[in-house]
Image (cartoon, grey):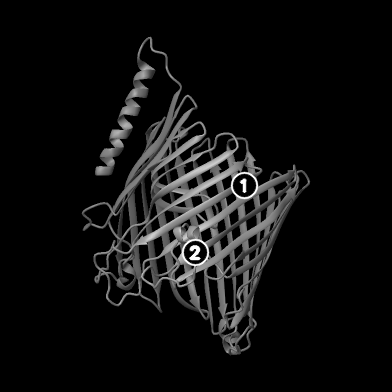
Amino acid sequence: MRTFTFLLILFVPVLLWSQSMDTTAGTKTPDVRWNGSIGVGTQFYTVTGIENRLISPVWNLSGNASISIRDYITLPFSFSVGRQGSSATYPTFNQFGISPRYKALTLHAGWRRVRFSDFTLGDHTFLGAGFEFNPGKFRIAAIQGRFRKARDYDSSDAFAGLSAVYRRTGYGLKLGYGTEDTFFDLIYFKAKDDPNSLKVLNPDSTLTASENAVLGFNSRVKISAGFSFFAEGAVSAFTRDLTSPLSSESVPRPASDIIQPRFSTRANYAFKTGIETGADKWKLRLQYERIAPEYETMGSFFFMNDLENITIAPSLSLFNYKLRINGYAGIQKNNLLNTRSETTHRFIGVGNISLQASEVFGIDFNFNSVNIDQTQANARFSDTIRVALVTTHYSLAPRWLWIKDTTSVKSLTTGIHYQVLNDRNPFTREFTDMNTAFLNLAFHQNFPASGYGWTLGANYNIIRLPMLTTTRYGASAGGEIFTKDQKWTASSRITYNLSLIESERDGSVISGDVNIQFKPAARHSFSVNANLLRNTSAAFDDFTEIIWGVHYHYLFH
């Protein structure tokens, strides 16, 4: 409620001021524009036959707004407050952030996400403040805040061993020069855990407070209208344990001021570079990327390291863009320092062909393949655990669309998907080889002038394992009604599927949903939705799940 009160304090003066300026006689209306939305909803869940898989009830209050004053100042912000479960005494999540903008200056406050580069600060959510200032060709930015909240050890937590987390704070700086096409940025980011932020810690825990400092750059050079060069890199010093002894190696004073070397400190690098070239109807991107083992930055939630990656991504459009061809191929490997017992090589290939042959008919073809192969490195390992497999996926999707003025719109969509997992290890292939096939068909007809529509569909799925074959097939039907002014809309859909194991019937799945929306006025909307899932099986427990909720949404401008 404190957040909601704060939002009201922030919202009301601005809204009243803008309304008064619009309605006061003899007063010139300033160039003030504001728009946004606010929504509140609740959801309930019930199940019989199995344990609860969701919490009930839950509610959520969220909103966003953007206020612009004479094209000089822009104030965008958002908030979200919610509660889960009947035993909750306070909101389970509570976030608010604002990023006002004035000409070349953007300020950040509250919960924000800012990106400097992939290898430094990469869209990690933080609670704090910052700014981005781009006067002319200068590119200046800085942020500071909390990147992780402290959480004490809780023995009642199902994941008690992982429940404790230190408080983490950090800051980042960026200084650059250039435009969006040609620029060079120098970036510094540092974050650190507070070892005194926990009151309760599991005595058996291996959790340690860490520290990280990253120095990087990000650049792009547009050489001509159809050719650009880009490069990005960083060096990261990461201390795993702040209580580990200080390193005896001598370090220059500037470096020791950035991060104090300890026996748990490791320095690693990451970089990527490439070119982009092309014209209106064709493009080509080539990229080389290398990320050292154990490279890590606290400015990103997750990072894949020990990786070398070479990729090529061409695209081509023909026949006035009716035929589009896109592709991607990548060669990857790990074990860059030859410290592992094996080296894993990967080849990834992706292709897409899309043809819009006429106003009525179009077709898409997609292909992707992943080839993984392990070879012996600096130590022998058993062939029985060697990974050598190829996963290939094909899909074909013809589509038809018929439009008859505004009286009738018909569409027919189909999809054929086939996937094969081919294990090339003779010791494991008899247990892991798998192929799957998925077929679906859907026909939809809508009558805009009459205010109704209907849908029919069918599907067939089969999964073949070395010692098991499962099949599922069924049909679906649905309908919708609506008023011409869209004040009332209602839709419903039901699906029935039969399941077979080794050609013997195992059970069935019935699912259905109902959605109703009412708009009493231009800016208001109410919606009610309900979902039903009924599952019967000879091999597993029968169960029935019902989820339903009510939502209200308000748009303002």
* In the image: residue 199, left or right of residue 503: left
Q: Residues within 10 Å of mark 2 (few under 14, many from 20)?
A: many
Quadrant in which the N terminus appears: top left
Q: Position of residue 519 (x, y in %)?
A: 38, 36
Q: Which residue is mark 2?
A: 237
Figure check: 397 above or below 66 = below
When the figure is inspected, residue 130 is found, relative to residue 544, above or below; the finding is: above
Quadrant where the C terminus is found in the figure: top left
Locate residue 51: give its quadrant: bottom left
Q: Earlier in the sequence, mark 1 or mark 2?
A: 1
Q: CA distance from mark 1 to mark 2?
A: 22 Å
Q: Is residue 6 above or below residue 25?
A: below
Residue at image position (58%, 61%) is: 440
Q: Dot 1 surroundings within 10 Å: few (below 14), some, or many (20 or more)?
A: many
Q: Residue at x 37, y 61 (%)?
A: 193
Residue 184, numbered label:
1
Of residues 11 and 483, the one nearer the viewer is: 11
Q: Nearer the viewer, residue 172 or 427?
A: 172
**Residue 191, quarter of the rendered image:** bottom left
Give amino acid for label 1: Phe
> For numbered disc 1, what is the local secondary structure?
strand
Residue 240 visible to the viewer: yes
